[in-house]
Amino acid sequence: MFKLYELLADYLVYGLLGLEKGSHPASALHFFVYDTLKIFTLLVLVIFFISFLRSYFPLEKTRRVLSKHRAISLPLAGFLGVLTPFCSCSAVPMFIGFVEAGIPLGAAFTFLVASPMVNEIAIGLLLSILGLRVTLLYIAFGMLVAIVAGFLIERFNPRELIESYVFELKLGETREKELSLEERVDFSLSNVREILGKVWMYIVVAIGIGAFLHGYVPQNLVESVSREAGIFGVPLVVLLGIPLYSNAAGVLPVIQPLIEKGIPVGTALALMMSVTALSFPEFVILKQIMKVRLIAIFAGIVGISIIAVGYLFNLIY
């Protein structure tokens, strides 16, 4: 299928428009056409598959399982985070729901990290842009960051650093309904439409930026900047990512050409992790439900974990 997309991009760019192969406009436009087709195809498939899995884990059931199986609540919360395509800000209400339900706070923080960083949008984009091996490593390391963050934060006894009213909230329960196969398929298709309806514009814009970088930014310039940063490249991009609030859809298509131009894989993925899991708007929202000290602990643990993962990726690649 992807070979067909490449042939279609060739025909459009070199045949129909008559652009010279190897020129800056042709290189940028070919990148845009091919990547747009490839990314949206894989996104549809991955979102459908993970949404189908999610249909077996409604919120009430998940909250009940996490409350009951506290010994494995951290990996379970991380798994739920993979199944829920929330940005860092929209994951906060789910975090409050977990706290209200009496779920261990470490598990709630694990979800808060995993949901925006490792979800079907990130997985679909990574698969289409960087391939299966990088995607699987990213999922593994992303889950590890979330679980380590939840485990360490729980050691700080965070309950006293969360506003007392959060524990008094009663969000209510919804009645679970067993879905038929047809209803699960309908649910999955509905999720595909809903999620793509929300993020398609960000993806197209991000691919456009990536296409410009691919076609017009000299490779030696990117390599030079990467060399200048040296071993400080990973922590620098993590700090840079904090004010750059976005989701995976908005950042991943941009980092692909940077990797192609010479930015180390781990450095690029550390930027993505920082942008999605550590954002200033998220800190502003969290300030309404927790003390500044806990936000600083959360940011410090997650930030250091992301830096470690960035270095590990660079070591592997």
Image (cartoon, helix red, strand yellow):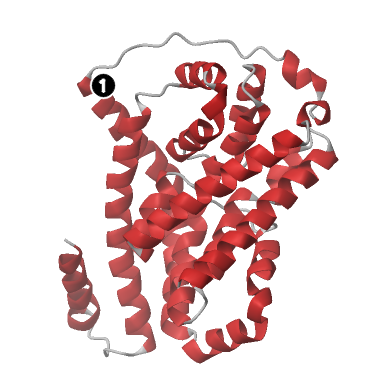
Image x and y of residue 40, in percent: 31, 54
Q: Position of residue 18 (x, y in %)?
A: 22, 85
Could you say where residue 189 lies in the image, as x and y percent from the top left? 28, 34
Name the quarter where the C terminus is drawn.
Answer: bottom left
Query: How many numbered callouts?
Result: 1
Q: In this view, does 17 lie to the left or right of 275?
A: left
Residue at 53%, 40% in the rendered image: 115
Asked if residue 81 is positioned above or below residue 164 in the image, the reply reads below
Q: Nearer the viewer, residue 293 or 71?
A: 71
Residue shown at 43%/21% (left/top)? 58
On screen, residue 158 above or below 212 = above
The correct choice, above or below, for 186 with respect to 215 in the image is: above
Q: Position of residue 2 (x, y in %)?
A: 20, 64
Residue 190 visible in image:
no
Amino acid at circle 1: Glu
Which part of the image, by quadrant, shows the N terminus?
bottom left
Locate residue 183: give its quadrant. top left
Residue situated in front as seen by the camera: 131 or 284:
131
Q: Which residue: 49% across, 81% down?
A: 262
Residue at image location 33% in from the left, 31% down from the top? 53
**Residue 171 visible in this rendered orientation of the protein:** yes
Where disc 1 sits, the SS reads: helix
Task: Answer few, some or many: residues within 10 Å of disc 1's Cα (few below 14, many 20 plus, some between 14 and 19).
Answer: few
| Residue named by callout 1 | 183
Q: In this view, does 299 lie to the left or right of 257?
A: right
Q: Residue furthest front?
A: 71
Q: Nearer the viewer, residue 111 or 2?
A: 111
